[in-house]
């Protein structure tokens, strides 16, 4: 992971736009948050990014004094994150018929 991506992920984690699964240590964009909180966190993330590039020399140098470079990377990083931890998502059955009981099988269960 490059320094620039590290900075973008750090901002997203700090502002709670991205979260890290405590079990699998995978990044995800929490879809459980309400949209108002999500919008506020997103706005805060971009404000932090712009401030870092404008006010802090190491970040300014890394992004060549161009806040758009960091905000674009931040946008891409957030958009690429899954909505939930990919390792926590339960696996889907291979065939739908493995899930559904037919009428006959449910009747058979009733008469056992």
Image (cartoon, grey):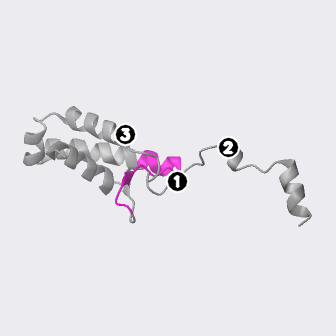
1 to the left or right of 96 = left
Residue situated in front as seen by the camera: 24 or 49? 24
Q: Which residues are magenta?
A: 24-40
Image coordinates for residue 32, horizontal then vertical, percent? 52, 54
Q: Which residue is mark 1?
A: 32
Which label's residue is closer to the chain start, 1 or 2?
1
Is 54 covered by the magenta stretch?
A: no
Q: CA distance from mark 2 to mark 3?
A: 29 Å
The residue carrying mark 2 is: 96
Residue under numbered circle 3:
80
Identified at 21% across, 49% down, the residue is 6
Q: Marks 1 and 2: which is nearer the front?
A: 2
- Badge 3 marks a residue whose secondary structure is helix
| Magenta stretch encompasses residue 33 | yes
Residue 96 x, y percent position in the rendering: 67, 43
**Numbered disc 1: secondary structure:** loop
The front one of 29 and 16 is 29
* Residue 63 x, y percent position in the rendering: 13, 38
- Tell me the CA gap for discs 1 and 2: 27 Å
- Crowding near the residue tagged with mark 2, few <14, some 14–19, many ≥20 C-alpha atoms within 10 Å: few
């Amino acid at each position: 992971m490059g320094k620039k991506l590290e900075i973008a992920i750090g901002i997203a984690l700090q502002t709670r736009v991205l979260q890290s699964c405590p079990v699998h240590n995978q990044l995800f964009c929490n879809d459980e948050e309400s949209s108002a909180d999500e919008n506020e966190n997103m706005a805060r993330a971009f404000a932090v990014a712009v401030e870092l590039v404008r006010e802090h020399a190491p970040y300014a140098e890394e992004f060549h004094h161009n806040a758009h470079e960091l905000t674009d990377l931040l946008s891409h990083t957030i958009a690429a994150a899954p909505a939930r931890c990919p390792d926590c998502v339960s696996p889907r059955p291979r065939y739908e018929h493995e899930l559904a009981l037919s009428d006959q099988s449910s009747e058979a269960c009733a008469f056992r």
